[in-house]
Image (cartoon, rainbow, N blue to C red):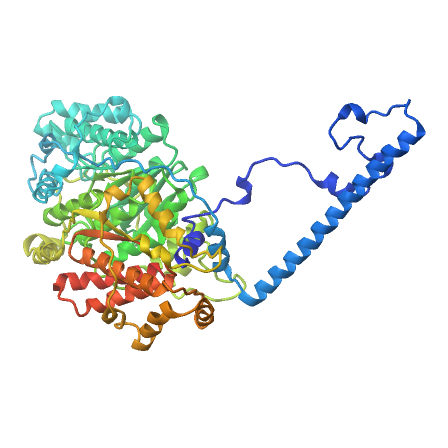
Amino acid sequence: MFKLLSYLRCGFLKPLPPRHYNYRIPNTDFYLQRKNKWTMAELPATNFDGDKESNLKDEHLSEEDKRKSHKEVLEEIKRKGREELAQKREERKTKREEKVMAENDSPDEEDYYVQTLSAMSISLQKPEKVLGTGLVYDELMLKHKNDWDPNFPEKPERISEPFKRCSELHLVERCIRIETQYGTEDMVLLQHTRELLEKVQSTSQMNRQQLQEFSQHYDSVYCNQSSYECALVALGSTIELMEQILKKKITNGLAITRPPGHHSMNDALCGFCIFNNVAIAAKHAVDNLGVKKVLIVIGIFHHGQATQKMFYDDPRVLYFSIHRYEYGNYWPNLRESDYDFIGKDKGQGFNINVPLNQTGMTDKDYLAVFHQVLLPVAYEFCPDLILVSAGYDCAIGCPEGEMMVSPACFGHMTHYLMGLADGRVCVCLEGGYCIKSLSESVALTLKALLRDPCPLLPLKMNHQIGTILNVIKVLRPYWSCFHYQDLLEDDTEELCSFEEVNKLPPRSDVKFNKEENESNMFPLTYTYPEEVQEVYLLQKKFDPIIDQLIAETALLRPPYRTCIVYDDDMRAHKADSRGHPEDPDRITRIFDKHVELGLLERCLRVQSRHATESELQLIHSSKYVEEMKELAEKTVFDLRKLAWNYNSIYLCQETYNCALLATGSLLNVVHTVLTGQCIIESKLTVGFTHKMLNASLITYNSMMYSSVSQKESIWVPLFIRNDILNHL
């Protein structure tokens, strides 16, 4: 119940505000003003038998007949008056009874929701069939490479090795392969100028020297004779994957493509990128495919400045970027990469930057941003499609990001996004330059898209609270999900405990890149700072850590996602009075709904059983167990009297047997999960919340005495604790 209330408060089950009820109703003011003020002359000339013909005044009627007619009318009025008085007496009696009940029971908000929801009937459509995960990959894109700098970080292995790792884990065979497509000129022109298109086209006819001269005009870009073809394939395949998702041929998908696109400007190549694949796909979706709202998530450790500019005033596209910034000292060194650039005109509030101002960020920092910023806004925005510019340069071991995000974390972030847009998530490879961590991260992203369980993450308190508060500070006026955040009083000198939140950017000591001071020529080779080269490229300090993470990550894939237990015998626990919200029909209707929606056939049926007394006594005292056991021998009067000793409970002679069945069934479910037969449990057991809570606690304690492996014993407590929290 508390979980439902929290969902209501968080907006996940947000009730429609009154302005959404657009039904017209009669104006009642006139009737209220004239109530009980009719005179005899104003009485409706309507006969009560409904015969309108006889209502007409007949001037030929005798005086005696007229008196008789008036007498009948008066008798009818008196009768109606008596009925109204009786009705009012009944209403007063009902109000008195309700007042007494309110004083005795003191129902709170939770009781109100229980009583209301118990009377609800919800119509659900049968869920659509799970369509599968699409995968785009083509070795043709390996032809794009730097012919004069073999150590350039954007290299063919960035897609071949991740695909190889996905194949090793048997993920590719579980996907629906999407045939690669070439992008068209019209697609390119959705976001780029014709001049830029023609320049890139011309590279296919250039020799090596001409290619070098061409590349020098763009920041961190190279081209060879195959680059244009590869860029078209990357673009066309991204759009094809997105269209397959929108056509419901697949549920979600991953595009392992290159060259990337998130830095490519309207009229210039930039940062390893040629055509802005995701931005073009988003533009195509909202302009040509009828998609109303698109969420673009750029999880890269360089700001996706090009994508931001393309949708800066467009409220149809919610842009979210988390990136390394260092107050503007990190590439691309732009003022507009900071958190206070939130869009303009109609797009104000739809551009979200989360700048990270130090290196070494870990899973906890990324997930904190996801939970505190991205997910609340995303659920309020309610997108129809999610496009992910998946940059893995924040992964551990990548010299670009110098961060410490584990491969498993990318699976978690992907999993969180799949709860939005009916699961329509299109993930497109962008950055990531440590091949080992990149490959593992891409594989775990694909596992999440395939709905495999995410590996556990050891999390601690994050230290990006100041950054998160800054983002909330500027977005609060535009998103109701941030209204919970208290504001400082204007008439006081109170300051936020995080100093950076009390100021607005920029810092005076930071020099930003601007269009007027941009260079026209850039180096042909790509070099890292000396300390980065020493740690990441020469010593390969993080390789052993990555190997250890890979070895310790449990890549589980149980044969069933969900198990379910149900036993009709639990219906025997019921109240002796009708109308109690905790009714046996609760579990029967739930089970029938599972059957109706075709969910039962997709679950593993678990056998019900009775819990043993020794299992009960892991939590409950022997005295309490014996007291419950004696319920079967008590009279109805004694059971009612005993129930008053407990909070919100009723008892019957079958209660103890049903409680044993509910507890034992839950233990069987947990055993099924522990033995790797499924990953999610569904309990259809009758009883109040405290019964399921106790069963969860019993499971948690009995696990301490079970002979499970160390890896399982680490995972189980977290599962049970989440189960407990769900029932608090």
270 is higher (above) or lower (below) than 483: above
Say which quadrant the N terminus sits in: bottom left
430 is higher (above) or lower (below) than 683: above
Residue 685, visible in the rendered structure: no
Q: Residue furthest right?
A: 63
Q: Quadrant of residue 364?
A: bottom left
Q: What residue is drawn where x is 19% and y is 55%?
A: 672
Residue 199 is situated, as x and y percent measured from the top left of the image, at 21, 25
366 is higher (above) or lower (below) than 430: below
Q: What residue is drawn where x is 9% and y is 29%?
A: 209
Left or right: where 536 falls relative to 67: left
Left or right: where 78 falls relative to 568: right
Q: How many marks?
A: 0
500 is higher (above) or lower (below) than 452: below
Residue 309 is situated, as x and y percent measured from the top left of the image, at 34, 37
Out of 114 and 265, give the one closest to the viewer: 114
Say which quadrant the C terminus sits in: bottom left
Residue 603 is situated, as x and y percent measured from the top left of the image, at 24, 46
Out of 727 and 19, give the one closest to the viewer: 727
Q: Quadrant of residue 517?
A: top left
Out of 400 and 621, give the one closest to the viewer: 621
Residue 206 is situated, as x and y percent measured from the top left of the image, at 11, 24
Q: What residue is drawn where x is 73% and y is 47%?
A: 84
Residue 230, visible in the rendered structure: yes
Q: Quadrant of residue 542?
A: bottom left
